[in-house]
Amino acid sequence: MRSLDESREILYVIRTLDVLMSSGVGLEAAIHSIAQGGYGIISKDFEALMKNINSGKPLERELRNLLKKAENDGYKRVVNTMLNNITQNTDIIETLRKQGERMEEVRTEKVKDYIEDLGGVPETLLSIGMIGPIILSIIGIIPQLISGGLADMVGNLEQDTAMSIVNVGLFITLLGMALAGIKAHTKDPGL
């Protein structure tokens, strides 16, 4: 769950860091801004980091602790970029921009794959949800339509048997629609 929350928010965090630091805000102030909220688990992590820094612990050590705690690869890269900026004085803004571009490309591919995977779901739901009940209702009224000599030719279908078939068919229709919905939900890329 943590990894999913990190993956949802990390691109927004990167863009925020980029904007803040490009406008002249320092790394610590940018971390403080993100800690104020709006970025899920990352805001909570940064809030805890800021509390520790304000109590006198070094930023480098806190970033190393956060690096161990992070689960998502993108989040780890961002924290590592911050750490490298502190220890080696690297160009954090350009590195963040490149990471953001890469993450956008990955997200775009995930969304394309998700759309392709769901291509047949609406048609499947429409087919099951519309055609199934129509066929089942016809089966349900067959005993009233068939009488006398026609019943001998086609075969005798009792009303109770027809209703049992309709009920089982409706249950199978609902089950099929639920399974199609579950398929759509499980393929959600979590973006």
Image: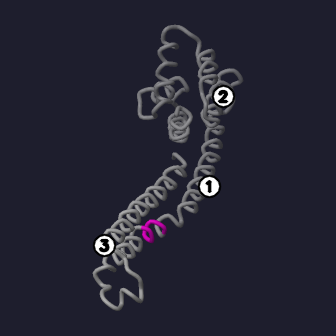
Left or right, residue 160 beside residue 7: left
Q: Is residue 112 above or below residue 135?
A: above
In this view of the protein, which residue sits in the foreground, 122 or 104? 122
Q: Is residue 116 above or below residue 108?
A: below
- Element marked by disc 2: helix
- Element marked by disc 3: helix
Left or right, residue 139 beside residue 18: left
Q: Which residue is mark 1?
A: 109
Q: Which residues are magenta?
A: 124-128
Q: Quadrant of residue 162?
A: bottom left
The kind of residue on which mark 1 rests is Glu
- For the view shown, which residue lies furthest in the left direction? 144
Q: What is the x, y in percent for residue 32?
A: 47, 24
In this view of the protein, which residue sits in the foreground, 96 or 6? 6
Q: What is the x, y in percent for residue 146?
A: 32, 85
Q: What is the x, y in percent for residue 18?
A: 55, 38
> Are discs 1 and 3 less than 8 Å apart at CB?
no
Q: Earlier in the sequence, mark 2 or mark 3?
A: 2
Q: Residue at x 38, y 72 (%)?
A: 130
Distance of label 2 from label 3 (alpha carbons):
72 Å
Q: Earlier in the sequence, mark 1 or mark 2?
A: 2
Q: Which residue is mark 3?
A: 159
The kind of residue on which mark 3 rests is Gln
Which numbered dot is residue 97?
none
Q: What is the x, y in percent for residue 25?
A: 51, 29
- Element marked by disc 1: helix
In front: label 1 or label 2:
1
In front: label 1 or label 3:
3
Q: Which residue is mark 2?
A: 80
